[in-house]
Each structure stands twice: as structure tokens, then as C-alpha cells.
Image (tube, coloured by chain):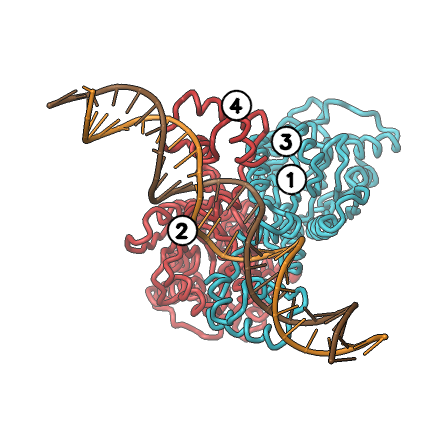
Chain colours: A red, B cyan, C brown, D orange
Amino acid sequence: MSIKKIAKLAGVSTATVSRVLNGSDKVKDQTAEKVLKVADELNYRMDHVARRMKVKQSDSLVIGLIITDIDNSFFANVAKGVEDVAYKNKHVLMICNTNEDPGKEKFFLNSMLSEKVSGIIMVPTSGNETFLKSINLEGFPMVMVDRKVKSMNVDTVSINNETGGFQATEQLIKNGHRRIGIICGIKGLTNTEERFNGYKKALEQAGIPFDEELVVFGNYVERGGREALKKLIALDEPPTAIFSTNNLMTLGCLKELYMQKIRIPDEMALVGFDDSAWAEAMIPPLTTIKQPGYELGVNAAELLIKRLNNKNSSKLNIVLNPELIVRESCGNR
Amino acid sequence: MSIKKIAKLAGVSTATVSRVLNGSDKVKDQTAEKVLKVADELNYRMDHVARRMKVKQSDSLVIGLIITDIDNSFFANVAKGVEDVAYKNKHVLMICNTNEDPGKEKFFLNSMLSEKVSGIIMVPTSGNETFLKSINLEGFPMVMVDRKVKSMNVDTVSINNETGGFQATEQLIKNGHRRIGIICGIKGLTNTEERFNGYKKALEQAGIPFDEELVVFGNYVERGGREALKKLIALDEPPTAIFSTNNLMTLGCLKELYMQKIRIPDEMALVGFDDSAWAEAMIPPLTTIKQPGYELGVNAAELLIKRLNNKNSSKLNIVLNPELIVRESCGNR
DNA sequence: AAAAAGAATGTAACCGATTACACAGTTACA
DNA sequence: TGTAACTGTGTAATCGGTTACATTCTTTTT
């Protein structure tokens, strides 16, 4: 039950029991054995809550993970990466899902701090900048993943979104398209902007004039993608190709295109972002920018764990590369 | 910082501060105001860890959730349902992913108990029955979701898998198929067995003899589905239709069928299990059994939270109904 | 106005671990 | 043999809250 009971039964003090249980310090082998035997017999399970009261926060064995949409396989992948590393390090995860709601985000941050997690890995929404900065100032270990918070000096792990946007657009241009629509994510997020910048650069490089009309927002959700697609095809001069900047919006596009009986890629070429499990099973198979979600999670977790033991070394920004997976949906003309 | 500092600055005792902060007991309005003002000024954030030491475990504000595959959108949906209810009740979630590994499962259970979570919602693997029962005996609040543990008296929330299996098979029979393959999940799990039983009942009802050859196992993963499909089409007398009993295996089937240029539904009809976001976007759109994953999660969380306040009322088994979504992949002949 | 009842607050023990410090026992060395 | 250095273990304070019980201050009752 408690360390006290073990101490009594083993005929030693609680201090000794604690020492044995932590494998630390010098305890005579013989004593240690005795204690372990009793602990085992009693089926003792340490109370981490009590432990956390004394131990320094970075030794609590809990890591917080805040993501924006657990339903999106990309974030599920990230979570899995974090999980695997956490498990290897005997940590356990507290996962929260903000649904892009800064209010929820703030609540979760507070909860996690109250729970004395050792550190937090998060996909930030936009809306809590000042709060985040104040936490960060206290030196609390944090890693931002996938998105960044502007002008905040903090560890980050992200992918090169601009390259991704560039590659996707370039591929469409290569295939002969000059009128290319883009369905952007949530305004104000760094990854939205970066992907958009990549798109613009590719156009520029190819000497294609940028047309504001071809830019629509879908907020990274399926319905948004669907609505965005409708807007694009309703244009006086609709695009012949579309770059959809995340998996859910791409799904929305696909469904709407099917409904409207617009054939891919002949009548509308399509490049997505995120290589979800289903992308390859589409007909035609989807050309897409593959994001290493799992690796993102792994790197974030490893970075955080390093940070726990080294609060003051300078902050790192890890950038992973996306990869263009050419399948059939990006067409030719 | 701590309750003590607040007490000092507000000129009251720590007991009073605690009372105010918990909104409980009788405190003069005037005193409460004063305390709250100081707490606010100090930017006080309560230490839940310290709190958990005294408070009864069912009042800790943390719920454990153990799932087997966070990558599978079905479980992600379940998690989201749990999350939403937890958030409404000001609880936070500790989510762990076992990857179907009983060793990990046991580690996570122990961790969660050590962390003094108020209760646990889990999708059990098979392999920790005796351990689970021992925890359960201590009266610890648990809810099993999606799968059950045989001969364990515990709250459960699941879907009627047998009905699901029956409906899927029946639909194929209706469409003229008599040689129907089934790709089962993981041997020994209750939902695997139940879906299989539904399949058999439908055959029986239609007077179709059961053929062992047509039963293959895919372990609920994509690669498994793919291999299973290969086995089925390699049969001397291959099936004309397949019932794939989860989303990932269905994805595997779809990819392999595409590769082998076997047309759906003409050359092979297909019914899946789980209505993933992409099911409708397939060509042809996938006929499938829709499981209410989100509702499963919601119900599990609500049940657990009720259970926290009512340890001894008799255990509940909530069963939700699946729904057959007829699209085009189940064909006609 | 005294006694009783009730409301508001304070005192201090407690939850279950960790750990600084103290202390006893052993070994090493001059 | 006396002293130093070390090893192994115990004592008790501590982390930051909660809460039973005690105490003080108000209000009501007679």
C-alpha cells in the first residue's frame, strides 16, 4: 500500500525503502533484496502523485500533448510518434484536443500546468500568444509542432511548408497547367502562409501571373474544402488544376468533384497535402505532398525530453522535408 | 504561488482560502471576494497534484483512456467523443496507445493507477484478463469500450457487432452473391467473433452452406487485409464478394484490387466495416457498416462519470446499433 | 441580559512520497 | 589505539493542498 507499510514489514525506515525503490544511493544489497521482496509481496504500486510533490517538475513522468484535431490522421500520426518516444522513456501522455478553439487551448494549458506535467508539446492555434509567451518565460519546457508562434523563442519541429507548396504547384505547372487554384487552410497560421508562399513562388518562377481570384480558404476541414471547390468552379474562368493544402479539404474536393461528375485529372487536376492512408486507394490515385507526421512527433518528443535535462541550452528549430508523391490525379494536358 | 501566500496577503488562513477556491462551505462574501482578488492578482494556479493527495480519487480531474490504435480513425473518433464529454466535466484525458500490445497495456494501466486517475476507459487487448479483474475487484471505475472482456463484471459500451456482420452479409446475399469471403480481425477478440457470427447467421438464414475456406484473418491492419484478399482470390473457387470487417483491412483490399485490376463491384463486390471519412469518396463509393464511434466515446465517458459518483450500482452494458450504408461497392449480379 | 444556536474562520494533522542532515558502524591508516 | 573517511541507515522536515475539530464572533431565543 504505502511506503510506510513496506518499511514496517521490512524492518527498515521509509527513507531506505525510497532509496531502494529508486535504485539510487547506496543501500546494502541484502537490505535492498528484503525491501523488494516485501514490496513485491504487497503488490506495491508507487503513488506518482505523492512523488511529484517532492521531485523536480521535469522528473514527473507525464508529458502534455495538445493537438488541434485528433480526427485528422495527420495529427493522429504525430501523436503516435510522440507516444512511441514517450513510452520508450517511461513517460505517459496527457493528450488534449482543442478543435482549434483557443479557449479550450488555454484551459488545457492551465490544466496541464496544474497537473505538473514535465513539458508540453503542442500544435498551437492562434489566439493565446501572450499567454504562451508568459509560460515560456517561466522557462517551462515546450515544443511547438507543425505550426509556429510568431516571434516566440521556443523549440519547434515543423516541415518545410513552403517547399511543399512549391513542389505541389510546380508539378501542376509541369503538367501544363497555368490556371491553378489553391485552397488554403486557416488564415493567420504559419503553415497556411508558408504553403501559400510556395504556391506563389512556383507561379512566379514559371512566369504565371498571380490571380487573387484563385485563392480560397477552406479552414482545413472537409466541408470547407467542398465549399472552396464550389467557389473555384463557379468562377468565370475556372482553374484547370487545384492545389488543396490539407487532407480533409482534399477529401471534400474529391466528393464534390464526384458529385458534379467532373473527371480527375482530365477536367480537373488535383494535388493534395498529406499522404493519408486512403490517398493511394483513390481512383485515380492521389498525387500529394507527403508530410512525415510520425517523424514530426518523434522529433518533437525527443527534443522535449532533451530539453527537460537541459533547460537553458539555446532553442532548436527542427525542419523536416515533405516529399512529393506523384500519382495520377495531377494529370497532364 | 501557493495557497499560503494568498492566505498571508489576504489576511486569512489557508483553510479559508481553500474553501473559497473550492466554492464550497460557508465563507462570508466579503472574505471570498478579498481572497479571489488576491489569487487573481498573484495569477494563482492551483496545484492539482497536491490536491489529489487529499481528495478522494474519484475527484481527481483526470480520466485515463487506453486505445489500441490511435492511427485508426475509428478509435480517433471514440477518443474525440470521450474528450468532448471529459471537457464538459472539466476533466482532462490521459490517452495511451497500446498498439494491441498487452505488455504496453499493463504498463499503461499501472501508470494510470499510479497517477491516481479517477477512472479508466479502455479498449482491451486480450492478454491481461486476470490483471484487469484484480483491478476491477478493488472497485476501481472502468469502462470497456468497443470490445468486452469475457466473464468480467464491468461497465461496457459497444456496438451490436453481430447485427453489423449480419447486415453486411445479408446485403451481399440480396445482391445475388452466394460465395462470400470474410476477412476477420484479431482472433479471440469479442468483436471479431461477433461479426463473424453475424456473417454465419446470414448465410444460414439464406441456406448457403458455410465454407471454412472463405474465412481469413487480417488482424485489423491494412497489410493484413491485403494479404487476406490475396488468399481469397487465389482460391480454386474464389468468392464473388467480400465482407471486410474493419476500415484498415478494407483499405488494403481496395489497394490490392486496384493493383490486380479487379473491378469493383463487377468482378468483386465489397462491403466494409466502419464508415471512414474517405469511404464515400471511393470509386465506386464504399458500402459499409457505419459504427457510431463518436457516440461510443460519448457514452463511455458519460457512463464513467456517472460511475464515479456511484461506485456500487450494478454494472451497465450499453449497446449501440451499427447502420448499413448502402453505396455502390456491394454491387449486383 | 444570559444562554443557546449558528455562522465564519483558524489550527493543525494528514495525504505518501523524497531528501538534507544526523548518526552509528566499519574500515584504513598513521 | 586514535582519528579520519566512508558506508549504510534513520529522523524528521517538506511539498501544497484539504478538512476535522476547535474557536471566535453573531444572531436568536427565552
In the picture, the disc for residue A322 is: 2
Which residue is disc 1 drawn over? B250
SS state under label 4: helix
Q: Amino acid at mark 4?
A: Lys
Question: What is the distance, in whole Å, between disc 3 and disc 1 at their CAs?
Answer: 10 Å
Task: Point out the image quarter for the N terminus of chain A.
Answer: top right
- Amino acid type, residue under disc 1 in the picture: Thr
What SS does tag 1 mark?
A: helix
Question: Going by the image, does D23 lie left or right of A147?
Answer: right
Which x, y percent locates residue A331?
Answer: 49, 54
Q: How far apart are the two marked residues, 4 and 1, measured between alpha carbons?
A: 50 Å
Do discs 2 and 3 belong to a common subunit? no
Chain ID at mark 2: A
Q: Nearer the viewer, mark 2 or mark 4?
A: 4
Tell me the distance, in whole angstroms, between the alpha carbons under discs 2 and 4.
52 Å
Counting residues from the start of the chain, the first of labels 2 and 4 encountered is 4
Q: Nearer the viewer, mark 4 or mark 1?
A: 4
Are dots 2 and 3 in contact, CB under 8 Å? no
Q: Which residue is mark 3?
A: B218
Question: Do callouts 3 and 1 mark residues in contact (Cβ within 8 Å)?
Answer: no
> Residues at badges 2 and 1 in contact (C-beta under 8 Å)?
no
Q: Residue at x 53, y 51 (%)?
A: B49
